[in-house]
C-alpha cells in the first residue's frame, strides 16, 4: 500500500489568489483530479490531487506559492447509499480518527473515491483492505 501524494496550497483570501494557483498548474500542464478548499478569515488551504504532484510542487514553489506535499489514502467505495457510512464505521470501530475527507468521481461507473487523512496511513489501509475496502494507488488517479 502506497499512500497518494496530495498538494496542500496556502492561499490568501484575496481576489485572484486561487485563480493564480490554478493558472500556474494549468500553464505547467498539470491536471487537477480532485480538490477541496477549506478557509479561515485570512487564508485557505487548497488541497489537490493532481496528475503529477512533483511537477505541481516545483511549479508552485517557483511561482512563490507556499505549498506542501502530504500523504493521504484514496479509498474506493460503491456509489450507493451507505457505502461511505460503512467505510467510516470500519475506521471508527478500529479507533482511527479522521482528520478530513473529500471525494471525487472515478472513471468507473458505480464507484466513488474518498480521500481521507488519518494519522497512520499504513495501519488504516490494512484495516480497510482487511475489511474488503480497496485502497487506490497514485497511478490509478493520474
Image: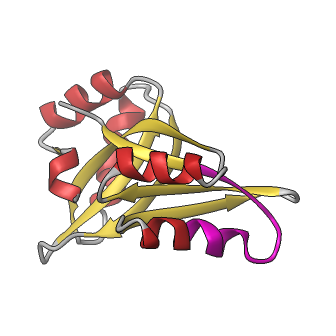
- Picture layout, residue 13 above or below residue 93: below
Q: Position of residue 32 (x, y in %)?
A: 39, 67
> Is 25 displayed left or right of 8 in the figure?
left
Q: Position of residue 17 (x, y in %)?
A: 72, 69
Residue at the right extreme of this rendering: 41
- Evaluate whether residue 88 shows in this view: no
Quarter of image, res 5: top left
Count of marks, rendered view: 0
- Residue pictured at 83% horizontal, 70% vertical: 14
> Is 91 displayed left or right of 137 in the figure?
right
Between 45 and 95, the residue placed more toward the observer is 45
- Residue pictured at 55% horizontal, 53% vertical: 60
Between 1 and 138, the residue placed more toward the observer is 138
Residue 45 belongs to magenta span: no
The boundaries of the magenta stretch are 9-22
- Picture layout, residue 134 above or below residue 47: above
- Picture layout, residue 116 above or below residue 1: below
Amino acid at each position: 500500500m502506497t499512500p497518494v501524494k496530495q498538494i496542500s496550497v496556502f492561499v490568501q483570501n484575496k481576489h485572484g489568489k486561487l485563480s493564480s494557483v490554478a493558472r500556474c498548474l494549468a500553464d505547467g500542464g498539470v491536471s487537477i483530479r480532485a480538490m477541496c478548499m477549506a478557509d479561515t478569515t485570512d487564508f485557505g488551504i487548497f488541497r489537490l490531487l493532481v496528475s503529477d504532484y512533483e511537477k505541481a510542487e516545483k511549479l508552485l514553489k517557483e511561482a512563490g506559492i507556499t505549498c506542501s506535499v502530504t500523504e493521504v489514502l484514496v479509498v474506493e467505495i460503491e456509489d450507493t447509499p451507505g457505502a461511505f457510512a460503512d467505510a467510516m464505521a470500519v475506521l471508527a470501530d478500529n479507533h482511527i480518527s479522521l482528520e478530513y475527507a473529500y471525494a471525487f468521481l472515478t472513471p468507473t461507473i458505480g464507484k466513488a473515491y474518498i480521500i481521507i487523512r488519518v494519522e497512520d496511513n499504513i495501519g488504516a489501509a490494512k484495516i480497510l483492505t482487511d475489511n474488503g475496502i480497496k485502497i487506490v494507488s497514485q497511478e490509478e488517479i493520474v
